[in-house]
Amino acid sequence: MGRWNFWLAVIAGALVMYLLGFLPVIIGPLTGGFVAGLIARGDAWTGVKAGFAAGVLWLLLVAVSFVFSGPVPVHPETLTGLLVQPFMVLLLLSNAFFSGTVGAIGGMVGGILAGKGV
């Protein structure tokens, strides 16, 4: 397994997660992690790493699209703005952990199947 193959698997898994974003919460990261683990073509541990990285990259894509989607109607100098911004960062970090963990589970399954020659 080459380095380029790993990052190709991560990008493909993140794109699958992004495209399946309209489905229930667990299906997108699980399927994207599975695709990343399958493309990575290693053992189970390589699939876990590819799935986790794909989940974190997916959340970065979601965060960038959220930032550029339009202005947030909260002024940062007000008390509400001071409370909302740390909450949004905490929300994004917890979602990154969730999508990375679920992607790692899917990547483990994909890595196991890729190691068996499926």
Image (spheres, rainbow, N blue to C red):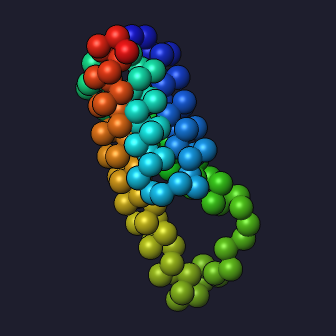
User: Between 78 and 88, which is closer to the camera in this rendering?
Assistant: 88
Residue 65 percent across, percent down from the top left: 65, 54
Residue most extreme to the right? 70
Task: Judge left or right: residue 18 versus residue 107.
Answer: right
Residue at the spot x=41%, y=52% of the render? 26
User: Between 61 and 41, which is closer to the camera in this rendering?
Assistant: 41
Residue at the spot x=54%, y=30% of the render? 12
- The quarter of the rendered structure image containing the C terminus is top left
Q: Is residue 90 visible?
A: yes
Residue 61 percent across, percent down from the top left: 58, 47
Quadrant of the image occupied by residue 113: top left
Task: Judge left or right: residue 94 versus residue 35.
Answer: left
User: Between 51 and 30, which is closer to the camera in this rendering?
Assistant: 30
Residue 99 percent across, percent down from the top left: 40, 50
Residue 17 percent across, percent down from the top left: 52, 43
Quadrant of the image occupied by residue 53: top left
Task: Please say if 94 is above or below 43.
Answer: below
Task: Please say if 26 is above or below 103.
Answer: below
Residue most extreme to the bottom? 79
Residue at the spot x=47%, y=38% of the render? 32
Task: Please say if 16 is above or below 91.
Answer: above
- The quarter of the rendered structure image containing the N terminus is top left
Quadrant of the image occupied by residue 40: top left
